[in-house]
Image (cartoon, rainbow, N blue to C red):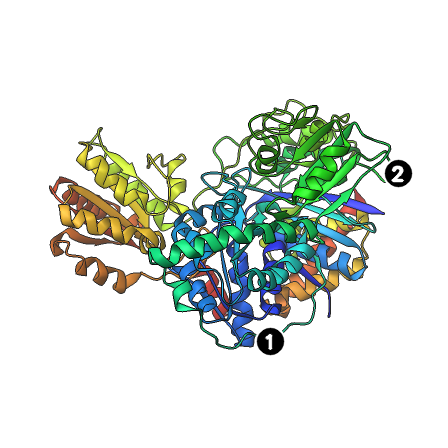
Amino acid sequence: MKQDIILAGVGGQGILSIAFVIDNAALKQGFNFKQAEVHGMAQRGGAVQSHLRISDKPVFSDLIPKGVADMILSVEPMECLRYLDFLSPEGIVITSRSPFVNIPDYPDIEKVMDAIQTVANRVIVDSDKQAKEAGSPKSQNMVMLGAASPHLILEETNLTEFIRILFAPRGDKMVEMNLKAFDLGRTAAIKC
Amino acid sequence: MKQEVLLGDEAVALGAIHAGLTGGYSYPGTPASEIMEYLVRASAKEKSFVASWSVNEKVAYEEALGVSYAGKRALVSMKHVGLNVAADPFMNSAITGANGGLVVIVADDPGMHSSQNEQDSRFYAEFAKIFCFEPSNHQEAYDMTRDAFDLSEHLGVPVMVRMVTRLSHSRSRVQPRSPREQNTLHFGKDTDWTLLPVHARRRFKHLVDKQKDLIMVSNRSEFNSLRINPKNTTLGIIASGIAANYVIENYIEGQEYPSFLKVTTYPIPEELVKGLVDHVDTALIVEDGYPFIEKNISGVFGIDGKNIFGKLTGHLPSTGELSPEIVRQGLGLEALPKRGIADFPLAARPPQLCQGCSHADTYRALNEALESYPESNVFSDIGCYTLGALPPYNAIQSCVCMGASVSMAKGGAEAGVYPSIAVIGDSTFAHSGLTPLLAAVAANTNMTVFILDNSTVAMTGGQPTFLSGEKLVKVIEGMGIAKEHIRSILPLPKNHDENIHIIKQELTYKGLSVVISARECVQQARKKKRSRT
C-alpha cells in the first residue's frame, strides 16, 4: 500500500502544517514515509510544494517521479495546475477554488477552474468560505486537509490527534477552530 | 530508543549530539540552517554543550577548531558557499589535524534552490585530503555523522559530511542510538598546531602519507554496497548519495537489475569501483552535483575497452538537480505515462518581499532618489533585500557573495560609477561588510552605503544578528566616517519624502556616506507578538 502526494500552495498558506499532520499520522500507523519540503528563499510568498510519500515498503527517492503521484492536494487553484505532470493518469486532485492573488498576471480564475475540470478525479472546495465559517480565514490549510482525508490511507482520528498537537501551543480556541475547519472540509468533500 | 521524525539536517544534528558533541558553530544559510537551529534548541534544553551562531563561517570554523584543539568534539555547519568563506581554516585544519573529533557539515544546493551557484563540496574534501561522507537518507545522515566523529579521532583529520538540499529538507524516520559522553580536556601537540613552515612541511607529508588509510577505510565502509549481477555484464551503475535512491526508484522489485555500486564515502572506494567497472562494458555514473566520481574514473584517457557514461558524456545533464525521471532517462528506460499540463498559461509566482517589509520602503525611496541619476549603480548583497532585483522594484544591479556590495561599490566608484551605491543587510554587514567599509573609509571613496538593519537574519528564518540598532551606529561611527554623513532613516511610507531628501543629500556629497535604514523585520515582529500572547 502506498500513497504519493504533492502538497501545493503559496508560501505562508501553511503547507508544512498539513505535512506535519500527515507525517505523524503515517508514523503512528507504522508506515514508512519521506517528505521533501521547500525552505529559504522560495518561502517568501512564492509557489511552494512538498512531496509526501507514504508506503508500507521502504521509500527511496525523496522526490515523487513525474506520473506517479496519487494525489495533488492544493490550497490554491492555480498552484495545483503547476504540478499536474506529477499526477498518475488515475490520480486525484483535491484543490481549493479560492485564488491567492499576489501577482499582477494571475490568470482568469474561470479559465483556471476550467483547466482543473479536465482532471477526471477531482474534489473542489471553497476553502476560503469554509475557513471563515470555522472562525479563522487562516485555516484554509486544515479545510483542505479535511477535504483530502476521505481519500487518504490514514485514519481520521489519527489526523485530528495531530491537529490537536500542532495547534495546542496556541491555545484551545485555535485547536477548536482548526478541527472545525478540518470537519467542514471533510463534509464538503464527501458531498462533492 | 524511540524513533524520531527528523529533517535530514536535524538527523545530522542529533547524530552529533549523541556522538558526544561539546561545541557546534554555524552561520545561517539555506539549506544548512536547520542543523544549528536544532542544536540551539537542544542545547537550551540540555545545557550540556555549546551551540552557537557565529558571525561568519570562517569564525565558526575556527571556533570549532579551538574545541578540537582542546581535545573535545566539535561540529561546524554551513551551506556550500559558506565553505568558500571558511576555506582558509578548512584547508589548514587538514594540516594541523583534528585532536578531538572535528566534523564539517556542508550542505550543497544542486539546482540552486536558494544559492548563487551549485558548487560540489566533494572537491573541497579531495582538495584538503580529508575523508567525506555523502549520506543517501536520514538514517545514514544520523549514523554517518556519529561515525564521522570516531573516524576524525581515529584518522586525526577533520571529516566532512556532504548534504544536499533534498536530503537536508526532507523529513523521515530515524532510529537513534544511545548517546555517549563528551571527551575530557586534552590539548593538541603545539608543534602540530603551530603551522610554521618547519612544522607545516612535516604535517603535510604526514597527511599525504595517511591517504592510503583513508582509502582503506572508504573501501571497507559498511555504508557502500556493491551488488554484482553475474548475468549482466553489459551495464553497471555507480551512484552516490541520494542519486542512488533515484536509480533504485526506477527498478521495480524482481526486475533484471544491472550491477550496482552505491558510493557514500570519499576518497573514492577504489576497490569497489574497480570491482564494478571490471565486470561490465558500460558504467553509468549517477551523482547529484558535479561529475566528481566520473571524472576521477575516466581521467584524461578513459579506460580501454570500457564506456564510462555520465554527465561529461551527456548521458545525464551537467547542470541542475537530478530527479527520478532524469535518472530514468539516463538509464535508457521508457518514460512513465503522465498527465500533461495541457497548454494552460501558468503565471510564475516568484518569491517576493513580505507585505509591509521595510526593504520595500527603502527601495521605493532609493529608486525615486536615483531618478535624476541615469548612470547610477546599486551593488547589492545576499539577503531578503536581494529580492529587490525583481519587479516591481528592479532596484539592484548585482548580488555576488557575502559582503561584495561594499567592495564592489568601492571598485565601481574608482572606475567612474556615480552614484556608486552599496545595499547590505545588518547581518551580512557583520559577516563580511566591515572590512571592505574600512578600506572605503581609508580612501574616502565617493560612494553611499545603505545598511538595511532589520535586526535579524531574515531570509534563513530569523536567526540572531551581531550588529544591529545602536551598536551598529556606534561601530560605524568608530570606523571613522564623518558623523554628518552617517544618516539614519526610518523606512515607512509616511516618511517617504523625507527619506528621499536625506538620500539625495548623501548622493551629492563627494565622499563616503552611510545611510542606516532601520526597521524590524515584519516576520520577526509577528513571531514576537505571537509568543507574547
The one of B142 and B490 positioned closer to us in this rendering? B142
Q: Nearer the viewer, mark 1 or mark 2?
A: 1
Q: Earlier in the sequence, mark 1 or mark 2?
A: 1
Q: Which mark is residue B254?
A: 2
In the figure, is residue B499 to the left or right of B271?
left
| Kind of residue at disc 2 | Gly
Residue B389 in the image: x percent, y percent?
A: 38, 36
Q: Left of A115 or right of it: where is B486? A: left
Instruction: Measure the alpha-carbon separation of dots 1 and 2.
Output: 45 Å
Q: Which numbered tag is attached to residue A73?
A: none
Which amino acid lies under the numbered mark 1 shown in the image of this protein?
Glu
Name the spot of residue B337 as percent of width and height, x first.
Answer: 78, 27
Identify which residue is drawn at 39% across, 68% down. Answer: B190
Element class at badge 1: loop
Residue B285 lies, in percent from the top left, at: 66, 34
Q: Is residue B375 left or right of residue A149?
A: left
In this rendering, does residue A73 appear at all?
no
Which residue is at 76% across, 48% downward?
A: A59
User: Tag 1, which chain?
Assistant: B
Q: In this orientation, does residue B291 appear? A: yes
Q: Nearer the viewer, residue A134 or B30?
A: B30
Residue that badge 1 annotates: B181
Image vertical order of residue A114 relative to residue B165, above or below:
above
Q: Nearer the viewer, residue A184 or B502?
A: B502
